Amino acid sequence: MEDKSPADWDPRAQEVLDDQIKAYDGMRKRCPVAYSDYLQWSLFRHEDVMRALTDHDTFSNAASRHLSVPNAMDPPEHTPYRHIVEKYFTAEHVREFEPMCRANTASLFDDLPQDSDVEVMNALGQPFAVRNQCAFMGWPDSLREPLRRWIGKNHQATRAGDRHAMAKIALEFDGYISEQLIARREAGEAAPADATTRLLQEKIEGRWLSDEEIVSIIRNWTVGELGTIAASVGILTHYLAKHSELQEALRQGRENLPDAIDEILRIHAPLISNRRVTTQPVTIGDREVPAGERISLIWASANRDEDVFGDPDEFQPQRNRDNNLLYGAGLHVCPGEPLARLELEVFMETLLAKTRHIEMAPDATPERAQFPASGFASLPVMIQRD
Ligand code: HEM
């Protein structure tokens, strides 16, 4: 067994939290397979992350002690749950949701002040994600604020590694969702025809999904939406504010928008990492990793690996498209991708249509989000509207 001390790095050191992307770039060069007390093993290289994504026998997803449907499951258990989840994100469902998504987004921009500084995360990122999540699931507007606060608390407890707080926060989420389930059961035939009601009608191997399973499925979706989509909105807005040529080009023609979104989110990942656990001893790079060890796949580094992408900051949508791991790969590849793509395209189209110009606010500095969140905690931007 390898001697694991001292640790190779501290994922919660202040300089890592202050600028995660820069810190992970450094780790990829200095120690691409790194041990820490907090995360155990972190993989920074594209090649190593791809290996973990495709060698399901050695890298298991059963890395959580709590029920997490479907992300912390391996086949054959994962397969039927995954089939259920995929049904909710078909092209048809996403198309049905589009008008509501467009209306939600337009109203956010209509509420912005004229020609003044805007704190993007507060005014756009979080409300955009939370409104769309409530609309997609059929939840009342009264849930928006509690959910927005919940995701912040969830990130804080994860960063602190505070298991007690994490369990309490999970229970708080269960409470919000259980209320929605109970209301629909009581309504019977009169229950709204929305995604939450449909989940109550799902069967797995001949039996109804339990409430615990439904809540867990919804928690997975909610974290995808509130954490990752909100972060994406900040990252995309920041990139346009910093790159006025690209901003102008996209204002002239929107046909390159989908590729541009993927490439910006490759350069600056909205999702930092996901976990695996080793099922047997394995050599990764020059490190011997024992069985039963936790592994973090650092998307925010793998997608910037020089061996695959050359200069990681060079904006090259066509060249980099095929290796971009934004939505993952393998059995657990993001099932919410069609919804995420729709929402981010609608966000960018609306941003470009409803503004004349955006740039960084002259007298304010953005504050980066800290692990496990990505993007920005606060992003002051000057938005000029017609
Ligand atoms: C820009 C937005 C998003 C990004 C970048 C993203 C990225 C990812 C990635 C990289 C994975 C693979 C995780 C792994 O291998 O362990 C994943 C899984 C997943 N994502 Fe997303 N996601 C986004 C939005 C969403 C949304 C909006 C939803 C649902 C509403 C969602 C639901 C899920 C679920 C349920 C899984 C687990 C799938 C499984 O384990 O089989 N994601 N996502």
Image: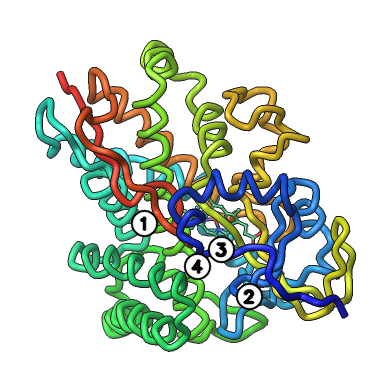
Q: Which label number is shown at residue 220?
A: 4
Coloring scheme used? rainbow
Label 4 residue near ligand 1, CB within 8 Å: yes
Mark 4 vs mark 1, foreground winner is: 4
Query: Which numbered disc, 3 or 4, marks the residue that appears first in the sequence?
Result: 3
Query: Which numbered disc, 2 or 4, marks the residue that appears first in the sequence?
Result: 2
Q: Which label number is shown at residue 136?
A: 1
Q: Is residue 360 left or right of residue 208?
A: left
Amino acid type at mark 3: Pro
Secondary structure of the residue carrying tag 2 is loop
Mark 2 vs mark 4, foreground winner is: 2
Give how far apart the Cα atoms at labels 3 and 4 are. Answer: 24 Å
Secondary structure of the residue carrying tag 1 is helix
Quarter occupied by residue 124? top left
Q: Which label number is shown at residue 11?
A: 3
- The residue at 42%/64% (across/down) is 222
Amino acid type at mark 4: Asn
Query: Which numbered disc, 2 or 1, marks the residue that appears first in the sequence?
Result: 2
Label 1 residue near ligand 1, CB within 8 Å: yes
Give how far apart the Cα atoms at labels 1 and 3 are. Answer: 35 Å
- Residue 33 sits above or below residue 149 on the image: above
